[in-house]
Amino acid sequence: MAKHIQILNGPNLNMLGTREPELYGHDTLEDVLAQCQAIGNELGFEVSLKQSNHEGQIIDWIQDARTKADGIIINPAGYSHTSIAFLDALNIFDGPVIEVHVSNIYSRESFRHHSYVSLRANGVIAGCGAQGYSLAMHRMGQLLADG
Ligand code: CA2
């Protein structure tokens, strides 16, 4: 059975590609899913993508991933900087976790420079636009192949 990569997105990322293109670019989450599925097809992985504006919903999806996914790519959005609960949920997921930020959080306000999720992430990609998700897919492919 093909390995499954779960892509999770936090609050306001449903607006990706529709507002603030100078910060977040023009690609929508639908575009991101299409790009990641194309890479998944090449690498032999199943890919699914979810977005929620609600912290508890994303925590439920992280918990579900324990039995349904081999790796998690997550853009925790604003919860990166506040949510110990995201960190706790990711800490009980056994597979690799890659954190993605579309914008360069290190060139923005200082409150964005710290991410609780980074304490758990196997890798972090920031400031590469929506392409960051594709880069994360390739890295995830490598981590899952390495076992
Ligand atoms: O750069 C990222 O991907 C962020 O995770 C995006 C979050 C922000 O709070 C993080 O510090 C960095 C904000 C998501 C808002 O997404 C929008 C996308 C398009 C238009 C408006 C908001």
Image: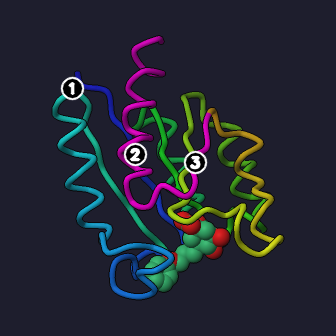
- Left or right of 113? Residue 57 is left
Secondary structure under tag 3 reads strand
Of callouts 3 and 1, the N-terminal one: 1
Which numbered tag is attached to residue 99?
3
The answer to whether residue 113 is visible is: yes
**Above or below: residue 51 compared with residue 116:** below
Residue 29 sits in which quadrant?
Answer: bottom left
**Quadrant holding the N terminus:** top left
**What's the residue type where badge 2 is placed?**
Gln
**Residue 98, position as x, y percentages in the image:** 55, 41
**Residue 42, position as x, y percentages in the image:** 17, 29
Residue 8 shown in magenta: no
Which numbered tag is attached to residue 89?
none
Magenta span of residues = 123-147
User: Quadrant location of ligand 1?
Assistant: bottom right
Pointer 2: what residue? Answer: 6
Determine the residue positioned at 69% across, 56% down: 86
**What's the residue type where badge 1 is placed?**
Gly
